[in-house]
Image: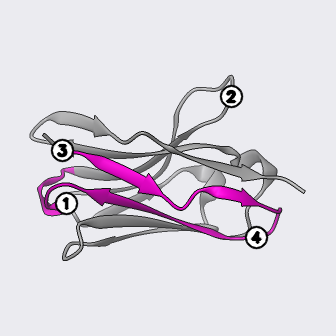
């Protein structure tokens, strides 16, 4: 069973930065897909950034140029550096891993961008 724990969320002013981390219970090298999704109140969950098969990186259009995903296989973590945050980035951010054709999700961490 894969467990994912997110951390690093909080309150930040527009233009500020946050770094989110996702710690996995097992080796992230097992994951076909690992990365981040977010869900704002009243909206559907959407792609933020993912790494597929350890080589392909994908970003959702709203975060391109501002967010950067990275992984550390030795520490079994995947991180999301978020720069130039905007109010519309406010959401619960979830870590996702697809392992052996099964999807696993973390509990989420709240990111609030407000002045």
Please report whichever mark, 1 or 3, sits nearer to the chain's N-terminal start.
3
Q: Secondary structure at mark 2?
A: loop
Q: Position of residue 96 (x, y in %)?
A: 34, 44
Q: Nearer the viewer, mark 1 or mark 3?
A: 3
Q: Quadrant of residue 113?
A: bottom right
Q: Label 4, on which residue?
A: 16
Q: Quadrant location of the N terminus?
A: top left
Q: Position of residue 108 (x, y in %)?
A: 48, 42
Mark linked to residue 75: none
Mark linked to residue 28: 1
Label 4 environment density (alpha carbons within 10 Å; few <14, some 14–19, many ≥20): some
In magenta, the rendered stretch is 3-32
Residue at screen point 17% across, 33% down: 102
Furthest-right residue in this view: 115
Residue 49 versus residue 58: which sits nearer the camera? 49
Please report whichever mark, 3 or 4, sits nearer to the chain's N-terminal start.
3
Give the alpha-carbon distance from disc 2 to disc 3, as whole Å: 27 Å
Please report whichever mark, 1 or 4, sits nearer to the chain's N-terminal start.
4
Give the alpha-carbon distance from disc 2 to disc 4, as whole Å: 21 Å
Q: Nearer the viewer, mark 3 or mark 4?
A: 3
Q: Position of residue 86 (x, y in %)?
A: 78, 56
């Amino acid at each position: 069973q894969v467990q994912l724990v997110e951390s690093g969320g909080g309150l930040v002013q527009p233009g500020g930065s946050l770094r989110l981390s996702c710690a996995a219970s097992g080796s992230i090298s097992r994951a076909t897909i690992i990365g981040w999704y977010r869900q704002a109140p009243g909206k559907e969950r959407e792609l933020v950034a993912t790494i597929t098969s350890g080589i392909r990186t994908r970003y959702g259009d709203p975060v391109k140029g501002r967010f950067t995903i990275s992984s550390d296989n030795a520490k079994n973590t995947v991180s999301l550096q978020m720069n130039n945050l905007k109010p519309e980035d406010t959401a619960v951010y979830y870590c996702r891993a697809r392992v052996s054709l099964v999807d696993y999700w973390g509990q989420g961490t709240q990111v609030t961008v407000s002045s």
